[in-house]
Amino acid sequence: MKILKYFLIALLIICLDQASKLLVHKYMYLHEEVNVIGEWFKLHYLLNPGMAFGIKWDNEFGKLVLTVFRIFAMFGISYYLFQMVRKNSHPGFLVCLAMILGGAIGNVIDSTFYGVFLDNAPIGSPTRWFHGQVIDMLFFPVAEFVWPAWVPGIGGDYFLFFSPVFNIADSSIFLGVATILLFQKRFFKVTEEENKSTVEPPPSEVQSTETDLSSPTSSI
């Protein structure tokens, strides 16, 4: 089936995401940092109890709500992808949806199961189920400097770009959404042309209709 290849893309992203997280969990200790390419690409082992790119939700039931939301979003994206494949949407758009789906499922696995199987639920969690922390490791400190003292408000402060630590699932979701936004005119152009062709009758039909209207009618 045509839809199968897009779900296989999502499955590939899930496998890469989970493999990287489990390898980091097994061979690195928490907060350990390893240089991969110079000083601007590193592996930095972090546990993230919140959302993508280290964003947290400080609430007793915030993590549970977030996990449940991710699960519903996962099924919603799956259904939407299925419907878009049936409508013959642009292949690039479908690939982006598959990337978003794969990333969403990757983080759902962490949130749902890691608290139990990796025992990484935050201290004080009401249950280890649905309270697992997401493993982050990709770190790109591209530039760092100290603001000059004369800069109002931030003079003398340390600045690091890019500071968030994330994972393959986060990257897949971000790239999928960003690509849709950048190429939305191209992705949805096919759909607009199909809708236009279904609404407007072919020129031959219009011509024949005009001929019929101009021809005299016979009365009985």
Image (tube, rainbow, N blue to C red):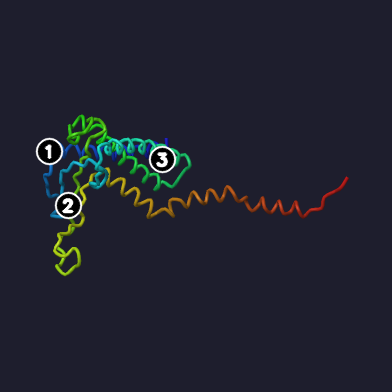
C-beta proximity under 8 Å, tags 3 and 1: no
Q: Secondary structure at mark 1?
A: helix
**Tag 2: amino acid:** Phe
Q: Outermost residue, front direction? A: 60
- Structural distance between the alpha carbons of marks 2 and 3: 33 Å
Label 3 or label 1, whichever comes before in sequence order: 1
Q: Position of residue 208 (x, y in %)?
A: 70, 51
- Structural distance between the alpha carbons of marks 2 and 1: 18 Å
Instruction: Please tell me which residue is depicted at 41% across the width and 40% down the height of the picture.
Output: 81
Instruction: Please tell me which residue is depicted at 27% across the width and 47% down the height of the picture.
Output: 171
The numbered disc on residue 81 is 3
Q: Residues within 10 Å of mark 1 (few under 14, many from 20)?
A: few
Q: Position of residue 93 (x, y in %)?
A: 40, 47
C-beta proximity under 8 Å, tags 2 and 1: no
- Structural distance between the alpha carbons of marks 3 and 1: 36 Å
Q: Residues within 10 Å of mark 2 (few under 14, many from 20)?
A: some
- Image quadrant where residue 99 sits: top left
**Tag 1: amino acid:** Tyr
**Tag 3: amino acid:** Leu
Task: State the residue position of label 1.
Answer: 27
Q: Position of residue 46 (x, y in %)?
A: 17, 43
